[in-house]
Image: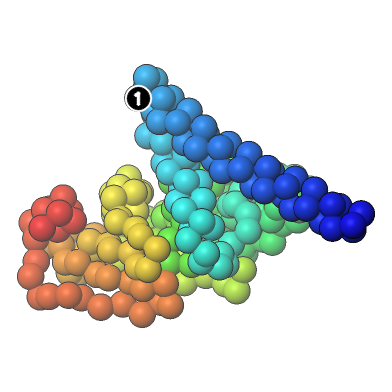
């Protein structure tokens, strides 16, 4: 009898804790909504917040995450000065340097990761195509296993980051509007990229702007 009572008590405690977690998630969602509606934030802050919320959505959807940390800028060498490189910082604060991304200053490095999105099973950021910290820029997927650079090139960092921010993401795939000729300029075409890395172009129709591509 004592064991049965103890089991019932433990189940009650577990159910109570579960209900508290549910209530906390709902309350946090309400707080976020109120903050966004009543305050004015810069684009970088909103982009970081959206990236974090997208990762939460992936967690709730039961999709395994390839990334368990965030991108940071660290000195390439051990004496604490430039050049700087990107590093993947895990939740235990261990860091894995990504030596393929080298920046002359920490400011230049931070500018590249001011817009980061979690999609297609990894973190995505706009980085220089080459190793000289200069244009052109490409969108790069970063996971624990390595990095993958897309073919699309952009003359300006802002153009690359704008496309990254406007990508439409759900739990199964991501829809990007990319330059048809990989030059970072019009015309634009739709590309559907699934979480397994496969991609398709739904049609050969092209669009004059990114906005008309995304929403038509």
Residue farthest to the top? Answer: 38
Kindly identify the residue that appears in the image at 29 percent across and 56 percent down: 168
Residue 3 seen in the current view? yes
Residue placed most toward the observer, 23 or 138: 23
Q: Residue at x 15, y 62 (%)?
A: 188
- Residue 204 in the image: x percent, y percent? 10, 75
Give the vertical position of 210 relative to 179 (above or below): above
Q: Quadrant of the N terminus?
A: bottom right
Q: Is residue 54 left or right of residue 110?
A: left
Could you tell me which residue is drawn at 40 percent across and 30 percent down? 33
Spot the residue most to the front: 1
Residue 84 pos. (x, y %): 62, 50
Residue pictured at 35% horizontal, 25% vertical: 37
Left/right placement of residue 108 relative to residue 157 reads right
Residue 130 shows in this picture? no
Estimate the x, y position of residue 8 in percent, counting from the top left.
78, 53
The quarter of the picture where residue 2 lies is bottom right
The residue indicated by pointer 1 is: 37
């Amino acid at each position: 009898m004592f064991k049965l009572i103890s089991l019932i008590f433990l189940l009650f405690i577990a159910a109570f804790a579960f209900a508290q977690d549910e209530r906390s998630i709902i309350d946090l969602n309400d707080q976020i909504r109120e903050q966004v509606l009543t305050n004015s934030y810069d684009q970088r802050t909103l982009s970081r917040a959206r990236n974090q919320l997208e990762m939460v959505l992936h967690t709730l959807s039961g999709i395994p995450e390839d990334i368990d940390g965030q991108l940071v800028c660290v000195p390439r060498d051990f004496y604490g000065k430039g050049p700087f490189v990107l590093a993947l910082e895990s939740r235990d604060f261990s860091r894995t340097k990504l030596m393929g991304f080298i920046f002359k200053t920490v400011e230049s490095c931070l500018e590249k990761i001011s817009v980061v999105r979690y999609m297609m099973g990894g973190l995505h950021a706009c980085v220089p195509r080459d190793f000289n910290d200069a244009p052109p820029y490409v969108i790069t997927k970063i996971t624990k296993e390595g990095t993958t650079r897309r073919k699309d090139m952009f003359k300006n960092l802002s153009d690359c980051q704008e496309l990254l921010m406007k990508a439409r993401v759900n739990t199964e795939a991501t829809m990007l509007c990319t330059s048809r000729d990989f030059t970072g300029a019009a015309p634009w075409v739709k590309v559907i990229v699934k979480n397994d890395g496969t991609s398709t172009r739904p049609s050969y129709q092209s669009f004059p702007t990114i906005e008309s591509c995304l929403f038509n």
